[in-house]
Amino acid sequence: MNPYDSQELLDQYLLFHYGSPEEILPYPGGPGSALDFPRRSVVENIDTTVSRRRALDLGCAVGRSSFELSVFCSEVVGIDSSEQFVAAAEYLRKRPELAYRRLEEGVISTELVARRPEYSNPERIRFETGDALNLDEGLGDFDVLHAANLVCRLPEPEKFLARLKYLVTVNGLLILTTPCTWLGEFTRPSNWPAEATHEWLANRLSGSFNLLNTKDMPFLIREHARKYQWGMAQASVWRRI
């Protein structure tokens, strides 16, 4: 069973992708700069005023980044391994709102509504369930490939990196973010990088991509009213040679 196919995680990710600052973090003095990560991972790493042909959002979860990509890309393909996440993203592609529940504590929860961004172009998007390590050979290539916090959740990350040069067009952009959290439940320790993640990415991608920029990007996932996951993803932007 996919570990992300649970109602608890679906609700968490709907809040992470679509929740307002007040819905996610109602406490003064909290880490507000970590909010809105699924939007920021797109708009802070690419010039959204430049129109693009095709975009691939790998590990799209419940779809917020795909909606952001649809603003400036004529076609967006969002792929995730979780059938439940993809079903929620597809629901929002077809309808403007989706009800879900935010856990408060114990058995107490609050009903909230995820809203598709009004400025997005849902007709440009296709969501599908898929494995980032075994993508359809007929998928084609893309001017933008966005993979947020995916690489350290793959069983064979080296296989993933080797495929990227075939997925991104010449002069196309690759946006990777990762919290560099290598866990045995997702990736066997024998498949972990033997060096710092940013050095490993540079060594594997050089020759096919030029590194344009790196930055630290905080993110915040609410588990319940008094427990949060705060992380610092490392974002890197690459241009296909």
Image (cartoon, helix red, strand yellow):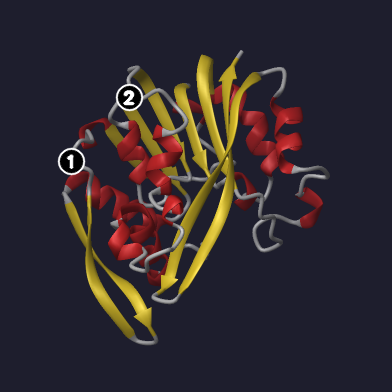
Please give the name of the residue rendered at 52% of the width and 32% of the height, measured from the top-left corner: 175
Q: Residues within 10 Å of mark 2 (few under 14, many from 20)?
A: many
Point out the frontmost of discs 1 and 2: 1
Compare residues 91 and 129 and report the one nearer the observer.
Answer: 91
Residue 168 seen in this snapshot: yes
Q: Position of residue 78 (x, y in %)?
A: 39, 39
- Disc 2 residue type (three-letter): Cys
Left or right: 106, with 215 as reference point: left
Query: Do tag 1 and tag 2 residues touch (Cβ < 8 Å)?
Result: no
Q: Position of residue 11 (x, y in %)?
A: 35, 66
Please give the name of the residue rendered at 36% of the width and 19% of the height, measured from the top-left corner: 52
In the rendered image, which residue does mark 1 sit on?
118
- Vertical position of residue 183 compared to residue 172: above or below: below
- Vertical position of residue 193 compared to residue 240: above or below: below
Please give the name of the residue rendered at 36% of the width and 53% of the height, measured from the top-left corner: 17
Q: Quadrant of residue 98?
A: bottom left
Give the CA separation, mark 1 to mark 2.
16 Å
Which of the marked residues, 1 or 2, is nearer the chain's N terminus? Answer: 2
Q: Secondary structure at mark 2?
A: strand
Q: Position of residue 191 (x, y in %)?
A: 77, 49
Q: Quadrant of residue 76?
A: top left
Compare residues 210 and 168 and report the one nearer the observer.
Answer: 210
Residue 73 numbered mark, or none: 2
Q: Secondary structure at mark 1?
A: loop
